[in-house]
Image (cartoon, helix red, strand yellow):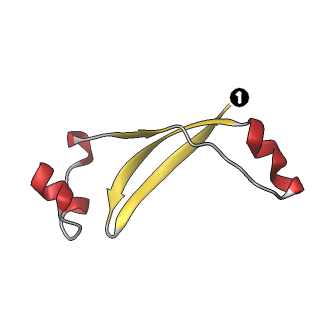
Amino acid sequence: MREALADPDERHRIDPADYYFRTNPLFETGAESCAWLHHTVCVGSGYLIEGGIAYRTFRVL
């Protein structure tokens, strides 16, 4: 598994049931219209795609 994860050309083929990524993103912006993000709590999970990682992120209410 470690070898497959290290290979960017192959890692997106790993079954998502064999690993997990979790994230708790923080946001910082200078735009007043997006200032609400400073006080927003989010959680998410990631999964491998060809060429990188994609995330599903959710706002906690």
Label 1 CA crowd tier, 10 Å (few <14, some 14–19, many 20+): few
Considering every residue shown, the one lying at the far right of the view is 32
Residue 22, placed above or below residue 12: above
Question: Which image quarter: residue 6?
Answer: bottom left
Residue 17, placed above or below residue 7: above
Q: Is residue 5 left or right of residue 57?
A: left
Q: Residue 37, position in %: x, y? A: 75, 44
Taking the spot 59% from the left edge, 40% from the top edge, the residue there is 58
Q: Residue 61, position in %: x, y? A: 70, 28
* Residue where numbered disc 1 is placed: 61
Considering every residue shown, the one lying at the far top of the view is 61
Taking the spot 81% from the left edge, 43% from the top edge, the residue there is 36
Depth check: give the residue in front, 46 or 31: 31
Taking the spot 81% from the left edge, 53% from the top edge, the residue there is 34
Amino acid type at circle 1 is Leu
Depth check: give the residue in front, 9 or 32: 32
Depth check: give the residue in front, 60 or 25: 25
Taking the spot 71% from the left edge, 50% from the top edge, the residue there is 28
